[in-house]
């Protein structure tokens, strides 16, 4: 399995180093053949090459089996000028990574203020209200007058069908429950189409239960009783909000893995930002990127890479849980380890099995 590794900005290189240590331990423990190819992106790429992401990387990732993207400091980019482009957007659009898979679960050893839960948010990742995802050219936010802005949302049947399909396939492997989150009572046409597609796909999964919850009610339900949810599927903006909320409910955004998956490629990406204020201090929590890499291995295994990759992904997740329970984690999670030591603790648990 060839993985293109792009460390990114800020804490990106540090948490990537810790993640690669876990992957190398996993490779030995499971007899995998991992070809980890590091390339530069972000501010360092701009310094060296005049652009934050070199165009040839798209073909390089297409030819590989997946990629790992560290966080980037896009807030510091003068986007659209001087070669400063958002790498996440570049790969998401270029590779049509339509499904953002965001698990959220509680871990023994961390406070579970809302009780134990284990759910996944499946977010449509290529359209919706976000102006960078719904137009081939131009801008989806229109300044009509100095005091009036109109924002456009794109919803398509094809995108609704494929994100629903991804959610039901995932639920089939889990607790066989899908919750479609929507605002069809107000957004009758767009969210109405989304719900229609979820219901159509549900017909192909008779053993999976489909529930439908309006998004504002969902915010109350998920914090009141997260245990009732298994797989949550929704449109882009609602999923963006829900996935961050559920990650924080588990104890920290730094505990949330994230996989951006398409038909032929997937990108493991930490759920958090580049945190430049703590970069270089060996205190950043690497778990989000480590769990994202585990999701990538499992995704590859299920696509035909072999059962050993699925088992390897599960082993990394188990090692993360064991490390947290043992207090072998960074200070933000109540431990005392630095970034690299926290990664090494997880790697050692993978080796021990």
Image: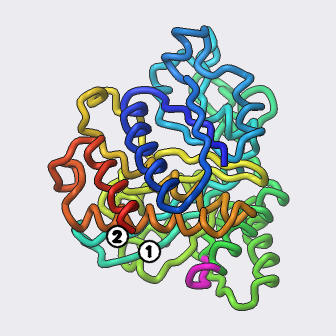
State left or right for residue 251 relative to residue 190: left
The numbered dot on residue 209 is none
Tell whether position 135 is magenta. no
Q: Nearer the viewer, residue 186 or 157?
A: 157
Residue for badge 2: 106
In percent of width and height, residue 165 lies at 75, 69
Q: Tell me which segment is drawn in magenta.
A: 173-178
Of the residues under marks 2 and 1, which one precedes in the sequence?
A: 2
Is residue 331 rendered to the left or right of residue 142? left
Q: How is the image coloured?
A: rainbow
Q: Residues within 10 Å of mark 2 (few under 14, many from 20)?
A: many
Residue at image x 44%, y 52%? Answer: 25
Q: Taking 37 as reference, is 343 above or below it?
A: below
- Mark 1 — residue? 118
Instruction: Tell which of 163 and 183 is nearer to you.
Output: 163
| 175 in magenta | yes
Distance from disc 2 to disc 1, alpha carbons, whole Å, reads 7 Å
* Secondary element at tag 1: strand
Where is residue 111 drawn, in percent x and y?
Answer: 22, 68
Q: Residue at x 38, y 80 (%)?
A: 225
């Amino acid at each position: 399995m060839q993985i293109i590794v792009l460390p990114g900005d800020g804490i990106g290189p540090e948490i990537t180093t810790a993640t690669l240590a876990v992957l190398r331990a996993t490779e030995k423990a499971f007899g995998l053949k991992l070809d980890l190819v590091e390339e530069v992106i972000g501010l360092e790429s701009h310094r060296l090459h005049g652009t934050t992401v070199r165009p040839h990387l798209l073909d390089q990732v297409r030819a590989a089996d997946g990629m790992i993207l560290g966080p980037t400091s896009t807030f510091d980019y003068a986007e659209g000028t001087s070669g400063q482009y958002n790498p996440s957007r570049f790969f998401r659009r270029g590779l049509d990574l339509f499904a953002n898979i965001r698990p959220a679960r509680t871990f023994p050893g961390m406070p579970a203020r809302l009780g134990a839960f284990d759910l996944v948010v499946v977010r449509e990742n290529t359209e919706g209200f976000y102006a960078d995802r719904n137009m081939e050219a131009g801008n989806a936010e229109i300044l009509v007058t100095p005091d009036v802005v109109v924002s456009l949302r794109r919803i398509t049947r094809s995108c609704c069908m494929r994100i629903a399909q991804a959610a039901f396939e995932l639920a089939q492997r889990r607790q066989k429950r899908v919750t479609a989150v929507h605002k069809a009572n107000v957004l009758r046409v767009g969210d109405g189409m989304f719900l229609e597609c979820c219901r159509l796909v549900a017909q192909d999964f008779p053993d999976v239960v489909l529930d439908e919850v309006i998004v504002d009610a969902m915010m109350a339900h998920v914090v009141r009783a997260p245990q009732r949810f298994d797989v949550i599927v929704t449109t882009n903006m609602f999923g963006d909000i829900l996935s961050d909320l559920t990650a924080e409910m588990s104890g920290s955004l730094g505990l949330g893995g994230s996989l951006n998956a398409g038909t032929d490629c997937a990108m493991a990406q930490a759920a958090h930002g580049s945190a430049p204020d703590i970069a270089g201090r060996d205190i950043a929590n690497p778990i989000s990127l480590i769990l994202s890499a585990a999701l990538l291995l499992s995704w590859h295994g299920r696509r035909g890479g072999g059962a050993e990759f699925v088992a390897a992904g599960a082993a990394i997740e188990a090692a993360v849980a064991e490390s947290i329970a043992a207090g072998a984690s960074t200070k933000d999670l109540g431990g005392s380890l630095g970034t690299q030591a926290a990664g090494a603790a997880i790697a050692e648990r993978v080796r021990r099995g």
